Amino acid sequence: MRGIEHVPWLYDALMSVMDATGFRRWRRRLVSKAGNPTLEVGCGTGRNLALYPDGTEVVALDPDLGALRRARRRAPRALLVAARAEALPFRDQSFPVVVSGLVFCSVQDPDQGLAEIRRVLHPSGQLRMIEHVRHHHPALARMQDGVQPAWTWFTGGCHPNRDTESAVERAGFAFDPEDRVARGVMRRFSARIRPEEP
């Protein structure tokens, strides 16, 4: 399915509007505690790549080749990988930090994608995400449900009504209460793998 998400120049134009309203600060905060190496799942056109702290080794992954070509122009030395979140081509426990920004609304199988992130994340590592989520108010959540088919078609895959926070918890992560921000349906948070129950 093709939509805004699959037209790199149009996607960048829309993200520039979001950045002008303060979203760039959220993106900068998202990548501020990157480790070496950091995996960015769903790097898209590479808008975050210039925001990482100097010296950060970033492995940036996206399934869209057009977006990766644009990311290459932004970050000529970055390691870019064409792959999907549901099938990460990395060894278990390879990364101390995994970053994802506005991705899991569009991942075809979010539970599988989060399971893959958990697999490649070091046991003491950190998942850092920005995502829009299902509204907590039932009437507004029903509105999201109503617009979802048209919105998903228009954007090329985005589901405005996904409860990504619950999916993160189901995948075995625990949120850091000191690094969790909510504004309307937008969320920025970090999470760690929940210790196994004895």
Image (tube, rainbow, N blue to C red):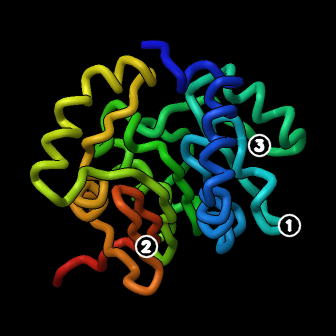
> What's the distance in space between the residues labelled 3 and 2, CA to CA?
30 Å
108 on left or right of 26: left
Q: Residue drawn 36% across and 18% down?
A: 153
Q: Which residue is mark 1?
A: 55
Q: Residue lying farthest right? A: 76
Amino acid, disc 1: Gly
Residue at the disc numbered 3: 79
Name the N-terminal-most of marks 3 and 2: 3
Q: Nearer the viewer, residue 34 or 50?
A: 50
Label 2, secondary structure: give it.
strand
What residue type is disc 3 on? Leu
Q: Mark 2 touching mark 1, by CB under 8 A?
A: no
Q: Which callout, 3 or 2, points to the residue nearer the camera?
A: 2
Q: Which mark is residue 181?
A: 2
Q: Element under label 3? A: strand
Instruction: Pinpoint residue 154: horizontal percent, then vertical percent.
Output: 41, 19
